[in-house]
Amino acid sequence: MKIVIYGGAFNPPHVGHAIAIENVLRLFPCDEIWVMPTADRHDKKVGTPGKQRVAMLDLMVKEFFPYTTTPIKISAMEIERPKLTTTYETKQELESQFPGNEFHFLVGSDILGDIETKWHQGKELFNSGKFLAIQNATIPLPDNPPKHVTLLDKDAIRVGISSTFVRGLLKNGYSGIPYISKGVADFIREAGLYR
C-alpha cells in the first residue's frame, strides 16, 4: 500500500492542516493517509497532551472529510513512545511494523531544505525516505527535486495559518472559528485549553 504520513504537532489542528490533507487526496493517489501528532522532540516541547491532540484531530477529520473514500487514520505511534522521538525512528518503526508498504512523508516547502541539515539523523532520513512536498504560503518548491521527493502540484491550495496564530486567538478569548472546526473549538473550550 502507498501510505502518506502527515506528522506535526497539530496544537491545535486547524483548517490549514485540513487543506493539506485535501491536497493529498486530490493530487496524490494513495491508499491511506496517517495523521501522526508528534511527541516532544529534541528541539521542541509540544505542551498539549498527545491524547487531547489525537481527540482534536479525530474531530477535525470527521468534520472535514466525512465522505472521503481514502481512509484517513490518526496514529498515536509517536506520542505513545516512552522517550523523545525523531522522524528517523518513526520511519524505521513504520518499516519494521508494516513491511511491504510504501511510506511518503508529507512535508512543507518551508522544511524540505532543513531535513538533511537540521533534523536528527536528517541525512540518513532524507536519503532513505520518500517525501511528498507541498508548497507553503511563502517558500516555493524546488524546480528540480531529488527523485525520492514528489512535488504536489504547485497550484495546490495554500493558506498561511499556523497553530501559533490560532493559539493566540484562543488565548485572547476568540473561538478560533473559522480557522478551526466547530468540533475542535468546542473541545478546546470544554477542556480549557490555550487560555
Image: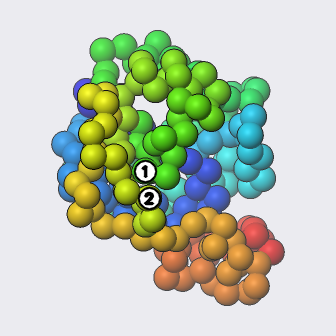
| x and y percentages locating residue 36 in the rendered image | 52, 42
Residue 120, compared with residue 37, is above or below; it is above
| x and y percentages locating residue 180 in the rendered image | 53, 73
Q: Residue at x 74, y 86 (%)?
A: 173
Whether residue 27 is visible, yes or no, is: yes
Q: Residue at x 75, y 68 (%)?
A: 193
Whether residue 63 is visible, yes or no, is: no
| x and y percentages locating residue 163 in the rendered image | 61, 65
Q: Residue at x 77, y 46 (%)?
A: 45
| 72 sits to left or right of 161 | left
The earlier-in-sequence mark between 2 and 1 is 1
Q: Secondary structure at mark 1?
A: helix
Residue ID for mark 2: 139
Residue contact between numbered discs 2 and 1, judged by CB atoms under 8 Å: yes
Amino acid type shown at disc 1: Ser
Q: How many marks?
A: 2
| x and y percentages locating residue 96 in the rendered image | 46, 12
Residue ID for mark 1: 109
Q: Secondary structure at mark 2?
A: loop
Residue 51, compared with residue 192, is above or below; it is above
Distance between mark 2 and mark 1 Cα atoms: 6 Å
Q: Quadrant of the N terminus?
A: top left
In the depicted view, which residue is nearer to us: 67 or 153? Answer: 153
